[in-house]
Image: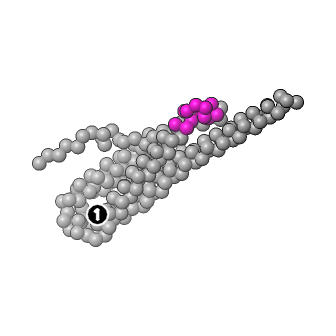
């Protein structure tokens, strides 16, 4: 009978620890999923703004149709990768980075069009896109922070035993595109 009084509290403590560990893992996993969803919201906003920007720019940039076509194609590729359930995070990231680069080139080309730069509609859309790009970057940082916390949680002892047993797997981080890692060259 004495052994029962010892074993029962030990089993209860282990059960409470397992439940708390499992619940903590689920909370962390849900935070990562929520952070990824926040990125989706900002990407959707960007996808919605781009056609308006293209329409605004079209009238001014008759000689720059190639840039507009590239932007439209990059948007379509990014949306396709975003909607593809089988696409890896790296595939989605590559498509989004290509879209970002194309947007940068569009804004660089618009410097040659003073009337366009003075257009209130263009300026408003450019500001909204810049704001959205900043929000996407902030969402990615938030996502990466949650991924770091979750990955750490499933790798440290003794939580790693429960995580392995319940088949929790690491999430991948969003990473900078290869072109964004290069040093910026300023020439005067």
Residue depicted at 33% across the width and 38% down the height: 178
Q: Is residue 166 left or right of residue 129?
A: right
Residue depicted at 31% across the width and 48% down the height: 101
Q: Position of residue 113 (x, y in %)?
A: 20, 63
Q: Residue furthest front?
A: 2
> Who is closer to the viewer here, 148 or 101?
148
Where on the picture, by quarter, is residue 109? bottom left
Q: Is residue 56 visible?
A: no
Q: Is residue 20 visible?
A: yes
Q: Is residue 5 left or right of residue 137?
A: right
Residue depicted at 30% across the width and 40% down the height: 181
Residue depicted at 54% across the width and 51% down the height: 34
Q: In the figure, 11 relative to 174: above or below?
A: above
Q: Is residue 175 left or right of residue 8?
A: left
Where on the picture, by quarter, is residue 154? top right
The quarter of the image holding the N terminus is: top right
- Element type at marker 1? helix
Crowdedness near tag 1: few (<14), some (14–19) or many (≥20) residues, C-alpha within 10 Å: many
Range of residues picked out in magenta: 152-163
Q: Position of residue 20 (x, y in %)?
A: 66, 42
> Who is closer to the viewer here, 13 or 71?
13
Q: Position of residue 26 (x, y in %)?
A: 62, 44
Q: Residue furthest top?
A: 3
Q: For mark 1, what is the residue? A: 57
Is-magenta flag for residue 169? no
Q: In the figure, 52 relative to 72: above or below?
A: below
Q: In the figure, 98 relative to 123: above or below?
A: above
Where on the picture, by quarter, is residue 58? bottom left
- Name the colour scheme: one colour
């Amino acid at each position: 009978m004495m052994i029962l009084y010892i074993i029962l509290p030990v089993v209860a403590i282990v059960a409470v620890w397992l439940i708390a560990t499992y619940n903590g893992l689920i909370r962390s996993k849900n935070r990562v999923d929520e952070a990824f969803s926040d990125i989706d919201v900002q990407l959707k906003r960007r996808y919605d703004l781009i056609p308006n920007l293209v329409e605004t720019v079209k009238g001014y940039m008759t000689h720059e149709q190639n840039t507009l076509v590239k932007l439209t194609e990059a948007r379509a590729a990014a949306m396709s990768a975003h909607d593809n359930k089988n696409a890896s995070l790296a595939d989605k990231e590559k498509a989004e980075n290509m879209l970002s680069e194309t947007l940068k080139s569009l804004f660089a080309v618009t410097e040659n069009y003073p009337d366009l730069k003075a257009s209130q509609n263009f300026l408003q859309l450019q500001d909204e896109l810049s704001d959205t790009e900043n929000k996407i970057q902030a969402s990615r940082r938030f996502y990466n922070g949650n991924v770091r916390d979750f990955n750490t949680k499933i790798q440290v002892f003794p939580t790693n035993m429960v995580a392995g047993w319940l088949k929790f797997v690491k999430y991948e981080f969003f990473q900078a595109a290869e072109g964004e890692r290069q040093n910026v060259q300023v020439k005067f």
